[in-house]
Image (cartoon, rainbow, N blue to C red):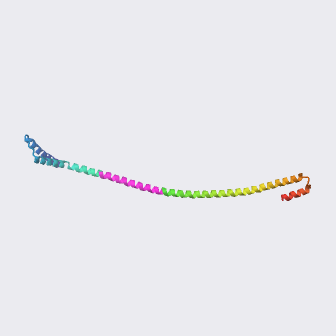
Amino acid sequence: MKGIVVKKCLFLGLALVPAAMFAAEGAETDYDIVQRTVNFIIFAGILWYLLADKIKAFFSERSLSIQSELDKVQETLKASENKIADAEKQLEDAKKLAAEIVEGAKTDIDAVKQKVLDAIDNDIANLNKNFDEMTKVELSKAKREVVNEVLEELLKSENIKLTQEELANIVLKKVA
C-alpha cells in the first residue's frame, strides 16, 4: 500500500517539474508546442495512473448494474409472456364453455318447444272432446225443446185428441 502512495507522489512530482520549469522562464513570450505536448502527455498519464482503477471499477459497476436491470426486464418479459399464455388459455376455455352453454340452451329450447307443442296438442284434443260433448248436449236440448213445442201444439190443438196412454207411448218412443 505504501508503495502505491509513493509511486503516486513521484508521478505527481514529475508532473509538476515541467510546470515549474515553465514558470521559471518567466519573461519569454515564445511558446513551445513540443513542451506543452509533453506536459499534456505526462499530465494525462498521471491522471490515468491515479484514476484508472476508479474508472475501471466505475465502468465495471455500471456494467453489472445494467446487466442486473436487463435481467430484471427479461424476468418481467418472461412473466408477462406467461400471463399472456395463461390469459389465452383461459380465453379458449371460456370460448369452449360458451359454446357448450349455447348448445345446452339450444337443446333446452328444443325440449321446451316440444313440451309446449305436446301441451297445445293435448289442449286442442280436450277442446275438441269438450266441443263434441257440448254439441251432443245442445243437440239433446234442442230435440227436447222441439219435442216440447210439438207436444204443446198438439195438446193445445182441438183437432187431435190423444189419450193419456197414447201420449205416454209417444214420449217413451221419443226418449228412447
Task: Please name the predominant secondary structure of the magenta segment in the image.
Answer: helix
Which residue lies at the image location 89% right of the left edge and 56% below the top edge?
A: 167
The foreground one among 131 and 85 is 131
Reply yes or no: does residue 85 show up in magenta.
yes
Foreground pick, 141 / 12:
141
Measured as percent of width and height from the top left, residue 145 is found at 82, 53
The answer to whether any part of residue 2 appears in the image is no
Compared with residue 22, is residue 155 higher up or lower down, i.e. above or below?
A: below
Residue toward you, 172 or 74: 172
Q: Residue furthest top?
A: 27
Residue 149 in percent (x, y) is at: 84, 53
Residue 13 to residue 160: above or below: above
Give left or right: position of 36 versus 74.
left
Residue 142's x, y, as percent? 80, 54
> Which residue is at 44% across, 56% downward?
88
Q: Is residue 84 magenta?
A: yes
Q: Is residue 58 visible?
A: yes
Looking at the rendered structure, the number of numbered marks drawn on it comes to: 0
Q: Is 2 situated left or right of 133 in this image? A: left
Q: Residue at x 89, y 53 (%)?
A: 155
Residue 81: percent from left, percent from top: 39, 55
| 57 left or right, relative to 168 | left
Query: Which quarter of the figure is the C terminus placed in?
Result: bottom right
Could you say which quadrant of the image residue 140 lies in?
bottom right
80 with respect to 151 (left or right): left
- Give the magenta-colored segment's residue range: 66-93
